[in-house]
Amino acid sequence: MESSIERCVQRYLHFLRTIGRHSTQKTYGNHLRVWMRWLDDAGLETEEGTKITRTSQMHDANSFEVVAAFYAYLKVRRKADGGLLHNNAIRSFQHAIRALWRFCNDQKMWAPAPAPLTFNAAAPVPMVAHVENHRERATVEQVGAMLDACDRLPSARECALAYAVLQVLLIAGIRRNELIHLEVSDYNRESRTLYVRVAKGGTPRTQRLDAETCAALDRWLAVRGEYICGRWKQLPNRGWQHIPDADAPDYMFVNSQKRHLADAGITSLFKRLRIVAGFRENVTITPHVLRHLQGTRIYQVKGVRAAQKFLGHKSERTTWRYIAPTSDQEMDEVLTQVQLRPKHQPATLQVTMAQAREGKHLNAAAPRTRLDLRKQPT
């Protein structure tokens, strides 16, 4: 049995929500909606002359011609700021469509036969080449300035919220989406742990906290105020309404009685902190930049295994991408710390740097007698 393209997309996004892939569901949902709008406007037709839209069957859009036309559209598509899409953004669109087709194939939603498209680099429409992004870096001094800026925010509630958010991001090392889905019950004061239930990859994990972060969370929960658990729903002719629901999440970070701190709220909070801290406009410090900074610092202290556990990565290769390259000054300090010297240094090794440069140390030791190990004639 096969459904329309729009119905297949709905079933696939519902499947992602069911298995807990919330971030993937959000990103792929946006990409697939762009794809369906493009199908409606592109005016493409099947071999029988039928126009291909979102109401068409999935096998109508499963052709190399349609795929190539959509990828060509992505390469010239303009963003809101007028710029072209990055290669990695186009790859994300490609991953979304291929994942949808795999899901349809697994669910037997093709008619009359399984998907003829090959999902690999040898396909006639290959994946766009991946480009390594330039990662923004933050310094310890900049993060300290942002922490100090929390005390200069207008209200005590906003101060406590900003400081708790920064401390959780720095010490727990969680992502932005994981932060906004934290619930009050996820925080265990006695064991000093934080349970990350909505994690990337769908695998929850538990992160350790320090005393300072626990104190910041206690301070925030004391001024957090009442939050009415519920869900927002768009009602006909009435706009968006908050519907109380006892089973809805009791979010830890909230803006008001009915609104929790979402993605836009995190962006706005970090923007205010950067302004109060006096940063220039070209200084971009985001939750992910803090995650990179802490991952690098933990790697320098305890190695890549500790950094992998802190960042919640399944693969060590992913962790290496987060770690900032060590500077020459830091490398010199490391070499000084790991240098091993004899307890009583021989006189022949006590050479000053000036002597080493001039080469005077070469004649400091007595000449050695070489042994002739060649076989002597008898």
Image (spheres, rainbow, N blue to C red):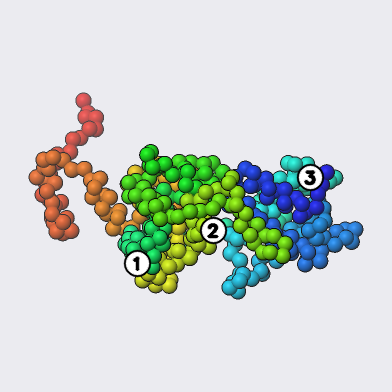
Amino acid under label 1? Arg
Which of the 4 quarters of the picture holds residue 161?
bottom left
Within 10 Å of the Cα at label 1, are there few (<14), some (14-19), or many (20+) other Cα atoms?
some
In the picture, measured across the screen, residue 76 lies left or right of residue 295, that is: right
Are the residues at dot 1 and dot 3 in contact (C-beta closer than 8 Å)?
Answer: no
Mark 2, residue position: 259
Are the residues at dot 1 and dot 2 in contact (C-beta closer than 8 Å)?
Answer: no
Q: Which numbered disc flags the more N-terminal residue, 1 or 3?
A: 3
Q: Which numbered disc flags the more N-terminal residue, 1 or 2?
A: 1
Q: Is residue 294 above or below residue 151?
A: above
In 3D space, how far apart are the residues under numbered discs 3 and 2 (Cα atoms)? 39 Å
Within 10 Å of the Cα at label 3, are there few (<14), some (14-19), or many (20+) other Cα atoms?
many
Q: Position of residue 195 (x, y in %)?
A: 47, 42
Question: Of tags 1 and 2, which is closer to the observer?
Answer: 2
Which of the 4 quarters of the picture holds residue 376?
top left
Q: Residue at x 31, y 58 (%)?
A: 328
User: Does dot 3 land on a helix, a strand or a loop?
Assistant: loop
Q: Is residue 199 above or below residue 85?
A: above
Q: Nearer the viewer, residue 192 or 15?
A: 192
In 3D space, how far apart are the residues under numbered discs 1 and 3 (Cα atoms)? 57 Å
Q: Is residue 296 above or below residue 275?
A: above
Amino acid under label 3? Met
Mark 1, residue position: 152
In the rendered structure, find residue 109 and report the number of the disc placed on it: 3
Q: Residue at x 55, y 51 (%)?
A: 229
Q: Residue at x 34, y 44 (%)?
A: 302
User: Does dot 2 land on a helix, a strand or a loop?
Assistant: loop
Question: Of tags 3 and 2, which is closer to the observer?
Answer: 2
